[in-house]
Amino acid sequence: MGDVAKDLTAGTVGGAANLIVGHPFDTIKVKLQSQPTPAPGQLPKYAGAVDAVKQTIAAEGPRGVYKGMGAPLATVAALNAVLFTVRGQMEALLRSEPGQPLTVKQQVVAGAGAGVAVSFLACPTELIKCRLQAQSALAEAAAASGVSLPKGPIDVAKHVVREAGMKGLFKGLVPTMGREVPGNAVMFGVYEAIKQYLAGGQDTSNLGRGSLILAGGLAGGAFWLSVYPTDVVKSVIQVDDYKKPRYSGSIDAFKKIVAADGVKGLFKGFGPAMARSVPANAATFVAYEITRSALG
């Protein structure tokens, strides 16, 4: 099996692990990010992450926190194939000799390159996922206009294409790239830095699973710490109405979020995102490393 196929297989396993562990947290994050700003004197729909969980389960049952998982599940192979394969190919380009470990700076460059490539697949996937997850926030607007909400990932995609054409699936591409490029650069850089610190040098091949869990979890946390406001902008743009949009673009969305909610508005859902990032990314990296090692 070639390196590309090995990265594809290991990346798919890692992505599946990430999705299973992290999706409920992601659902709550999107619900908090996309809830409308309450009128003066009124309370927001969700008082916080715990309240969002309670309301979601009360309204939709436990399956509600896994709503929208079909879209990323259907594309997890492609997304992680691109992410880990592009990263692997960039590692090969950056090495001065075959098999030589990369420096932290080189891993940052490899992660940024992988982030560029994965953005074009992540954008439509995230758009479908976010619109499904935020349906409770969109329900009032849909009811007022007499439009029924889509019932699943395929239905959402068809609805978007009918309203805005194929380009509608790439709404939010700019903030998606603004998240994926620096986010993956930081994540892979931090992951390598922690592994090398724990190993006492560049050779990290003998690290145990506990070390990989620690490095992967902290790397995932670093990803969100570095790009979270960009993710909020991406989410509000992707759940925005196509015919009567509230936001004309990323800068406009940024300004309106800050004007309505202050800087804290750029950190809506930050708690669930960070709670998700550590176990989900730990699962991703451990699953990837174990699978990649098993494949030789």
Image (tube, rainbow, N blue to C red):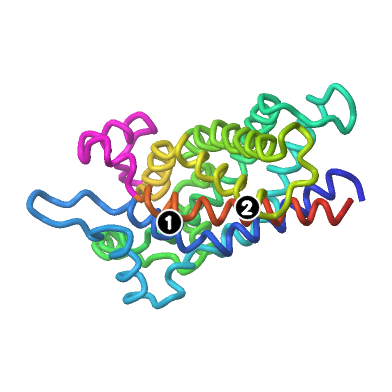
Q: Residue at x 71, y 58 (%)?
A: 13
Q: Position of residue 85 (x, y in %)?
A: 76, 42
Q: Is residue 240 magenta?
A: no
Label 1 crowding class (10 Å Cα cut-off): few <14, some 14-19, many 20+?
many
Ranked by sequence position, the earlier of labels 1 and 2 is 1
Nearer the observer, 222 or 235: 222
Tell me the SS state at disc 1.
helix
Quickly name the residue at label 2.
213
Whether residue 251 sits left or right of residue 90 in the image: it is: left
Quadrant in the picture for residue 196: top right
Question: Looking at the image, which is closer to me, 198 or 279?
Answer: 198
Q: Is residue 293 above or below residue 99?
A: below
User: Badge 1 is on which residue?
Assistant: 131
**185 and 165: which is toward the camera:** 185
Q: Residue at x 49, y 56 (%)?
A: 129
Read off the magenta span.
Answer: 243-268
